[in-house]
Every structure is written in structure tokens, then in C-alpha cells.
Amino acid sequence: MKTALARGEWVDPALRRVTVGDWAARWFANQVQLKPSTRHRYASLLRRQVLPVWERVPLSAITHADVGEWVRRMTQAGLAPSTVRQAHRVFSLLLALAVRDGRLTRNVAAGVRLPRVGRSEKVFLTHGQVGELAAAA
């Protein structure tokens, strides 16, 4: 404990006991800078991907390996890579606030390997289709 104090890494155990659900509600309420569409997306990601798994888990109990396992399970469940990445981002953002607030010493979601988002093949209109589009407009 003395070493952690000297390094500035000591965290009061009472602060670490807060659950992800309670912390997520506090974090989300303070996201006043978000556009309405982003706020809606974050709320959906919290409700569908983050909270069903992490809601009752204390911040102090989450490990880097746990987050990696969560990402793997979402990917194996067939979620799109972009959805998995966005859910991870929301979770990482709320853990980052816990670090800044002195509840965690580090963000255990940082550095977790995420699925790659594939590029979709571009579709180009033919000259005839452009003409049809122009006529319809």
C-alpha cells in the first residue's frame, strides 16, 4: 500500500466498489457535449451490449482479459465489427472517466484487440442509371 501511495497508484477501495451500472449512469448523464444522434447510439450500446454483461460488476473486478473475452463473445455472436468496436469504445470511455476520477489506476479496456471493419465494395451507377436518376429527380 505504501508503494502504491508513493507511485500515486493507490485507490481507495470504497471508490472501486461502485458497479459499472451505477458508474455508467453517472458517466452518461454528464455527456452533454454529444449530438442527439450520438447520445442515442451510446444509450443503445449501453442498454444492449454493455450493461447486460457488466451492470452488476464492481469497477475493481474488471480485468483486461475479461474485456477481451467480452469482445470475443460479441464477435462470435455475429455482431458487426463496427458495433463491437463502438460498444468497446463506450465501455472504454466510461472506464477512462473512472481513472480520471481516481476510482481505477488504469483503463483495462485500453489495448484490447478489436475486430477489423471490412470495406464494402463500392457501387457505381451506369450512365443509363444516372440518366434515370436525373429524370426521376
Image (tube, rainbow, N blue to C red):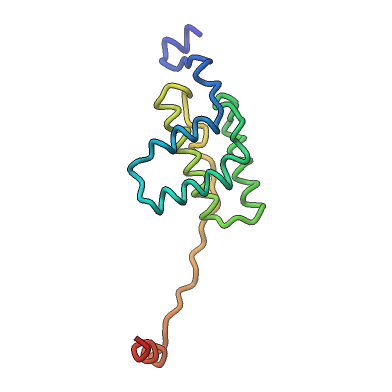
Question: How many dots with numbers?
Answer: 0
Q: Position of residue 33 (x, y in %)?
A: 33, 43
Question: Which one is in front, 68 or 34?
Answer: 34
Q: Position of residue 100 (x, y in %)?
A: 39, 27
Q: Position of residue 31 (x, y in %)?
A: 38, 40
Residue drawn at (45%, 74%) of the image: 122
Question: Which one is in front, 24 or 127?
Answer: 24
Residue drawn at (55%, 55%) of the image: 81
Query: On the picture, is 98 further left or further right than 18?
Result: left
Residue furthest top in the image: 2
Q: Position of residue 133 (x, y in %)?
A: 38, 87
Residue drawn at (42%, 31%) of the image: 97
Q: Check the image and report above or below for 15 versus 119.
A: above
Residue drawn at (49%, 35%) of the image: 24
Say which quadrant the C terminus sits in. Answer: bottom left
Query: On the picture, is 127 further left or further right than 2?
Result: left
Residue 71 falls in image quadrant? top right
Q: Check the image and report above or below for 66 versus 83.
A: above
